[in-house]
Image (tube, grey):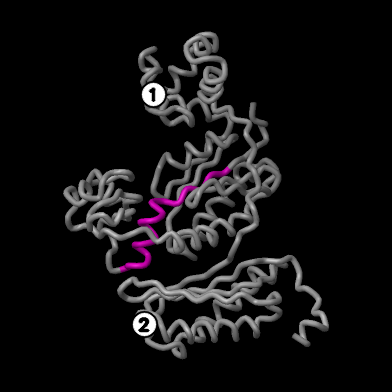
Amino acid sequence: MPLPSRIIGHVDMDAFFASVERMDHPEWRDDPIIVCVYSGRTPDSGVVSSASYTARQLGIKAGMPIAGAQSLCPAGHFVPVHHERYSSLSGDIFSKLVGVGSIVEVASIDEAYVDLSSRVHGSWAEAEGTMRDFQSLIQKEFSLSCSVGLGPSKLVAKIASDFKKPGGFTSVPPEEVPRFLDPLPVKCLMGVGPKTEEELASHSIRTVAELRTTGLDVLVSSFGSAKGQHLFFSSRGMDDSPVIAHREPKQHSRIWTLAQDAGSYDPVSLGVYSNADALWEESAGNGQFFNQVGVVGISSRMGQSSKTKSLSLPCSSPEQFRAELDELFRLLFESADLPLRRIGIRVGSFSSAIKQRRLSDFLG
């Protein structure tokens, strides 16, 4: 059983891939956006990876053939997945969550759990305020929407975050768990797929309330000991699985839209320096010194170019960081598909402290 004092948050980025594409294309606003995995066999072969909510309203969903999505929404914007872009933003977003709770678990590229129990000293009101602040921060800093759920277990928190998407906020204290879960269909519970849902329906069990009022002996007899017990406890919101701390991020990055498309580096260098100083504080300022520096540029035609440099020793100062970025950006602008609409910087290959230089470092 979950500890009564636990307060778990679940953050779910709303239509993440499609929302990032919309952010990169502000002129699309509320147009349907469909992010696709193209097979390359024909121009239209492949499957849908993600769809904006306007596209979902037309019946488009992840996993359906691209050709089928095009027939439902011929005027939609169909774009290929940009994994590096999404992964970079995901790391930036969830790194902000580390300061919110005592433990953070990144469950996937677009969702994460956070254990707030000790940080808010068991206060649900404080936990709610903290997570609302985080939700506002993500909207303000990244122009992206996320849905948040709070519960006494990971199970309840995850269901709660999906309750009022997009941009939803649902808090379910322990005493509210039965009232919250009971009306929901059994398929909302983790581990209840189409086959289990069908089996439960054959026993006239379609809602969580009907499952909760079914005896443990009946569930064990019908589904076996392990699964029967899982269904019994899940219907009560009981899940004692802990939030497991995520690994240290492999990189930190910042990416931004330019005020005007740029055909050369000099007009955007001041913006680069400003973001470089902030990224330096976020990484080296917290003891994460880096041996790798990278830059990226996205053209007005959405072509993407990047340059990366590995350093023999960790970057030792903000001034050196700026100089490395200057060099990389000048190389990037020589080879990129110009003009550039968005540019970004990233650092990686972290070490906990700057190594002492040895005499051999200077002698080659």
Q: Which mark lies nearer to you, 1 or 2?
A: 1
Image-quadrant location for residue 249: bottom right
Q: Is residue 248 left or right of residue 266?
A: right
Quadrant housing the N terminus: top right
Going by the picture, which residue comes out furthest to the right?
A: 359
Q: Is residue 189 above or below residue 211?
A: below
50 in relation to 140, above or below: above
On whether residue 297 falls in the magenta region, the answer is no
Q: Which residue is mark 1?
A: 195
Magenta region: which residues? 9-26
Q: Which residue matches tag 2?
A: 260
Amino acid identity at mark 2: Gln
> At 64% from the left edge and 66% from the top edge, which residue is drawn?
349
Q: Determine the residue positioned at 39% across, 27% down.
A: 185
Q: Where is residue 30? Give x, y as percent.
A: 27, 59
Q: Quadrant of the C terminus?
A: bottom right
Question: Extreme bottom residue here?
Answer: 266
* CB-based contact (under 8 Å), mark 1 and mark 2: no
Q: Is residue 318 left or right of 325 when viewed as pictured?
A: right
| Front one among 39 and 264 | 39
